[in-house]
Image: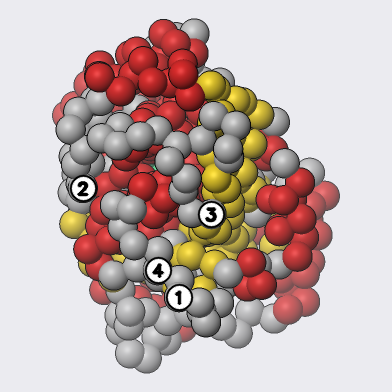
Amino acid sequence: MQVKDCLVSAPGKTILHGEHAVVHGKVALAVSLNLRTYLKLRASSNDKVCINLPNIDTFRCWDLSELKQFVPFVNDKKDEAQRLDAELVRRLRDFMGVTNGSLDNGSMASLAFLYIYLSVFASGELPGLTITVWSELPTGAGLGSSAAYSVCLAAALLCAAGTIPASLREWDQTARWCQEDLECINSWAFQGETIIHGNPSGVDNAVGTWGGMLRFLAGKIIPLSRVPLLRILLTNTKVPRSTKVLVARVKDKINKFPSIMNPVLESVDAISYTCEKVLTCEPITGEHYSILEELIDINQHHLNVMGVGHPALDTLCRVTLAKGLHSKLTGAGGGGCGITLLRPETDSSVVQSTVQDLKDCGFDCWETSIGGPGVQQHSPSSVKEEILDILDRY
Ligand SMILES: Nc1ncnc2c1ncn2[C@@H]1O[C@H](COP(=O)(O)OP(=O)(O)O)[C@@H](O)[C@H]1O
Ligand SMILES: C[C@@](O)(CCOP(=O)(O)O)CC(=O)O
Ligand SMILES: [Mg+2]
């Protein structure tokens, strides 16, 4: 079986409020970034399945003959992935020699790939193919790189399997899928996230799929279109961390101290609702910005209470507060990235000197633009040359 080549991309995200609480059924507000993950899928005629993941220094190849052993264990092809097939995951782990608690980047990414590949192709013939992924997002830093990766895998493999049509027509530069196809992509991306994270809420893959700003509550996705374009400074403390470990840590804490931790989650929920209410006011005044800043400070304290802070994130908050700016961690915390809210009138000299102070701490820091489109299919000419070069290198 020969598949069609395709090129797709999906955005990273930042969570304004509700990280961790969202895993426990509370609201999160999240928005896509202009930083994207790109994936190129090519047919190969040598009966091999290969993945090239240069961001995480992972390059793996399997013979089709060894992958065929899994076909009898894959459930009937489903258009919508509902629940992770734990038995298939266990067999794949054994095959790859990966232990259950493994945090190895390459193993998790390979496992997510093999699971989706086998699941979408098992009802027909397994095709030889090569997938190369390159991301503008830092990996494991709270900006949803795992979800952008999973969304790209799902879109490209579903497209190659013919489960969803190619969205790109001959004359298009970029194209998106219809709502039903996006739901299909999102459900398979959630499976990828489950393999990488253990217990994801689904907010990250939803933003990677639909883009824009959204409210996420227990799997329900509400796009928020009437919100202002926020100015946000992103800071990567470069302290490595794993979402899987942090999500498990918060769960342990809730189990250990339910009567203490549940009110914290309730409070984060109320913060997200209040933030959404303020963001949908027209016009947004300086007083509204003061509320948004206070909500950021309160939530950052809550996240520290949940045990997902880090001294580097404390430094970020202190350095920005010295300039009158308010910050919180974003994503799973424990290091990684934080966001700082800028007001529309914040002077560029203040931004520049804050960026410099944060760089002097050893952090990466940049003003970002938010609200990028969700998953897309591209013609090669619509992708920056330096990204195409990387994708074509392998
Ligand atoms: N560009 C990429 N290429 C391959 N795998 C990736 C890429 N980006 C993320 N991943 C996968 O996602 C994992 C990081 O996910 P996670 O800990 O959730 O951090 P993040 O906050 O970036 O989502 C990596 O270990 C890897 O398995
Ligand atoms: C902590 C959490 O709320 C967000 C994790 O985001 P990231 O993987 O750190 O980008 C987990 C989740 O919602 O699945
Ligand atoms: Mg992640």
The quarter of the picture where residue 295 lies is bottom left
Image disc number at residue 5: 3
Determine which of the numbered discs, if any, sits on residue 167 in the image. 4
Residue at point 72% right, 41% down?
A: 394
Q: Residue at x 29, y 52 (%)?
A: 163
Dot 4 alpha-carbon crowd within 10 angstroms: few under 14, some 14 to 19, many 20 or more = some
Question: Is residue 325 something that shows in the picture?
Answer: no
Amino acid type, residue under disc 2 in the picture? Asp
Q: Name which residue type carries label 3.
A: Asp
Res. 173 visible in picture: yes
Which disc, if any, is residue 79?
2
x, y percentage for residue 331? 46, 45
Residue drawn where x is 19% and y is 28% of the image? 75
User: Which quadrant: the N terminus?
Assistant: top left
Residue 232, image x, y percentages: 56, 67
CA distance separating discs 4 and 2:
17 Å
Amino acid identity at mark 4: Ser
Which of disc 1 and disc 2 is earlier in sequence? 2
Marks 3 and 2, the one that precedes in the sequence: 3
- For ligand 2, the image quadrant comes to top left
